[in-house]
Image: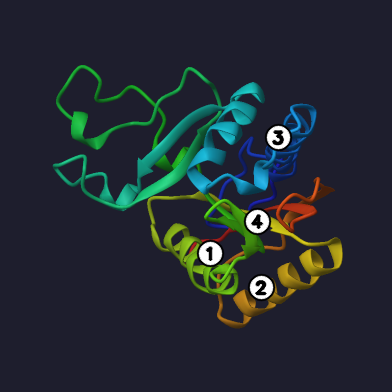
Amino acid sequence: MVSCPPPYSCTVFDLDSIADSLAAAIRNAAERADIEQSPLGVDALDELSIHPLLHAALRDAGFGIHPEQRYPGDRLKSRRSEGERCDIVLTESPTDHLLDPLSAGTLFAHRGVAPDEALWLEVKVIGQFSVYDGVGRPNPQYSGRLLGEVMRGAHKLAADHGIAHAALTLILFNADEATATHDLEAWMNRALEKSVPISWPSLRRFAITDRIGNAQCTVAVMKVNRL
């Protein structure tokens, strides 16, 4: 069980177990690429291509998976195409669905899980080396995405008062373990200096075959606290 200080209540969302599932999804994809002798590995996939791997692993772990859900603060907007979306929302059971405030007054108004009973999970995938024009090269956006996009993801989760349980998942691909350790610690320190409301992550780290410059994968799942 996760230990949740006020204003949070304890839930079944164990971030250590979630980290295990997400890391297994990436590791299995890396191993499949080795078996198939693929010229490119899992680290060459873009973020949206990795999401289905994560969905499958979390579904196998027994969760309900709800991808690309509007943030609670945006769910009252009359057009469902409006509003920012969270990468993955988890519910306790695969048969659950999220309550939709736009269904008020219908037969489905009271069916489902309230947003504050679900886990809202943002996922960021960043490689030190990426594929450009079919060739592995140093990623010029690596530092910028870590310092900008990842921190903004945590702030979005923390700022929405309709969310009680939130976590940020950072999947890093690096040249080696030393670089992975240094960069994650540097990012965490910078985040804490900027008062990004996160807790120290549940970490999973393993080697992958170096095809484009990355030989290490880190999966970090960190609790996001409400602002």
The residue tagged 1 is 150
Query: Who's the residue at 68% across and 57% down the image?
Result: 172
Residue mark closest to the camera, 3 vs 1:
3
- Circle 4: element type: strand
Label ID, residue 222 = 4
Give whichever of discs 3 and 4 has the lower sequence position: 3
Q: Position of residue 29 (x, y in %)?
A: 70, 33
Give me the C-alpha separation between circle 3 and circle 4: 32 Å
Give whichever of discs 1 and 4 has the lower sequence position: 1
The residue tagged 2 is 187
Residue mark closest to the camera, 2 vs 3:
3
The residue tagged 3 is 38
Give me the C-alpha separation between circle 2 and circle 4: 13 Å
Query: Who's the residue at 45% across and 22% down the image?
Result: 96
Residue mark closest to the camera, 2 vs 4:
2
Name the amino acid type tagged 2: Trp
Q: Nearer the viewer, residue 8 or 103?
A: 103
Q: Is residue 27 left or right of residue 146?
A: right
Q: Position of residue 74 (x, y in %)?
A: 27, 50
Q: Is residue 96 left or right of residue 3?
A: left
